[in-house]
Amino acid sequence: MGNGLSASSINFAFINQCVNRYFAMFLLFFGTIGNVLNLLIFTRKIFRNNICVNYFLASAIADSFLIISGPLPRLINGFGTDASQSSSVLCKLKFFTIYHSGYTAAWFTCLACIERYLSSSESVRRRHLITMKRAKLSMVFVILFGIIIFGEQFHCIDINQNLYGAPQSCNQLKRSLQCQIADNAMQFTFEMFIPAVLMTTFGVLTVRNVRQRKRRVHVANTTKRSIPLIAVTNISHPSVIQQPTNTMIDPNNQPATMEINRAAQKREMQLIIMLLVQILVFIISTFPISVYKMYSIATINQTRSTLRASVENTLFNVFVLFLYISNNIKFYTYTLCGATFRKELLKLFRLAK
């Protein structure tokens, strides 16, 4: 007997079954609870007119579709009862929903990053670009564009593909290299790479704006002086920041006014911190599957042994579930990073006034 490993010596089907059962169960349980709470909190009156929070709400709705079409079918498949493995229509719809909802959730976060950058800018012209109408139009455009770029799913995905070691028969057409390249390239480019670049870029620019604004703030030791009011965004109002103006502050009212400004700045910073943490989680969760997508495209013409194909398909299964982490833990990152979010959560359960 040889010492080398072979596909027959490792039960890849059992490994994938366990991964789908227990990892998907974990994601589904915590993701469903967190996402329902996100929807309840972001639809509260205090957030209703805030553009950035509206992007968060849209992203939470997209996450809901992803949870239903991603972890849930994989959990069911772990017990061998997934109907999408035997129905071509359900198979295509499942893949399209997974790709499109993941793409829209990522792009709505990108739009939130852009909104934070514009709202923190010292330029009045840039701040005036932020309107609720434009925000809604941008979300509609993202949804429609996603339908176009992921429409190939209805041709390139089908049942009975039976890739060795794969956890499901519903997969890319194994006989069509063009479909495999298009499917991998579309998901990598529009769901992972471009959103990650945009999130990082505008996240860094937003932090730069905040630092520049803080350096401009100073308090003169005079009885009556001109204090530049910092451009702030109240979390309960649209993200159109007031133009900085000079206001004469009476010494008796100065502490109260400064306290109000500090509170408003703190609320604004909470949204920025929530976004930055979300960007970090997104990059971490998408990195493994991004590398795999690039690898699969680069080696698509190589002949694979049974063992190699089984290992790759098992890793792909794990990486896909790892990708869902970003969409399933947003509630918990919001809770950790946002004091206003936590306060509204307590109000939701009537634990705070």
Image: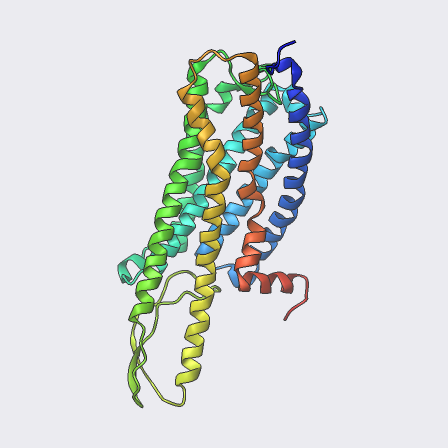
The quadrant in which residue 209 appears is: bottom left
**Residue 94 visible in the shown view:** yes
What's the colour scheme? rainbow
- In the picture, measured across the screen, residue 236 lies left or right of residue 212, that is right
The percent coordinates of residue 328 (x first, y second) are 58, 44
In the foreground, 163 or 37: 163
User: Residue, x 50% and y 22% (percent of image)?
Assistant: 154
169 to 283, vertically: above or below? above
The percent coordinates of residue 138 (x first, y second) are 39, 45
In the foreground, 255 or 286: 286
**Quarter of the image containing the C terminus?**
bottom right
User: Residue, x 48% and y 42% (percent of image)?
Assistant: 284
**Residue 130 visible in the shown view:** no
**Quarter of the image containing the N terminus?**
top right
The quadrant in which residue 127 appears is: bottom left
The percent coordinates of residue 157 (x first, y second) are 52, 20
The quadrant in which residue 343 appears is: bottom right
User: Residue, x 62% and y 60% (percent of image)?
Assistant: 345
The percent coordinates of residue 254 (x first, y second) are 39, 84
> Could you tell me how many numbered marks the image carries?
0
- In the picture, measured across the screen, residue 191 lies left or right of residue 306, that is left
User: Residue, x 51% and y 16% (percent of image)?
Assistant: 173
In the foreground, 348 or 310: 310
77 to 193, vertically: above or below? above
